Image (cartoon, grey):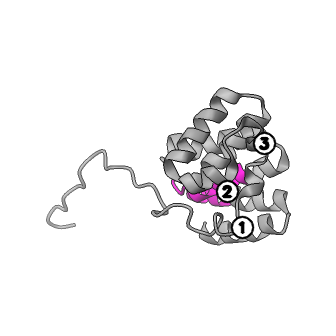
Amino acid sequence: AILSVYKGIALDASGQYESALSEFQKAAKNWPEYREPPIRMAVTYVRLGKYDEAIEAGNRAVLKLGSKSPVVWVALLEAFARKGDTKQAAAAMANLAGNDKDLAKRIGSKPGDWRNAVDKLTRKDLEFGLESELAYRPERTEPPKKKQSGD
């Protein structure tokens, strides 16, 4: 899964967005708890103008996987702004500002600034490891079974 993410990052950086998405999707399928692929997918979908897909991927990263990455909020911010949903865009900006004030300042506080938010991401913003922990580890729902003698 990590190799697919690295390939996707390289493809995305060189403007090969459809190929990048394919790699991110492969990584997401092989390791569904991994936060990085849906964050990267959200950014790439925005670059392709596929805002509904960007919102779906961003929401998966945030709501299902608990992402705290400022980058996902940038992608959601632009996707909502491009769709004309200023209320959701403002909520994304508030979350971005709560996570990374400097990045929020660079993006800009006016709704007109939000329509090209992803373009304002730097190479440093997009470095690998958008999350401090790479995988979401849900709590065990049942205790591990004890080995019985003779096993």
What amino acid type is highlighted by mark number 1? Ile
Highlighted magenta segment, given as a residue range: 26-43
Q: Is residue 136 left or right of residue 19?
A: left
What amino acid type is highlighted by mark number 2? Arg
Q: CA distance from mark 1 to mark 2?
A: 8 Å
Looking at the image, how many numbered discs can be counted on the residues?
3
Residue 146, x across and y down, in percent? 18, 58
Provide the residue designation for mark 3.
115
Element assignment for label 2? helix
Q: Is residue 86 left or right of residue 70?
A: right
Q: Is residue 100 left or right of residue 117?
A: left
Provide the residue designation for mark 1.
9
The quadrant in which the N terminus is found is: bottom right
Element assignment for label 1? helix
Residue 75, x across and y down, in percent? 68, 47
The numbered mark, 1 or 2, whose residue comes first in the sequence reads 1
Regarding residue 52, the answer to whether it shows in the image is no
As rendered, which of 13 and 119 lies closer to the eye? 119
As rendered, which of 56 and 33 lies closer to the eye? 56
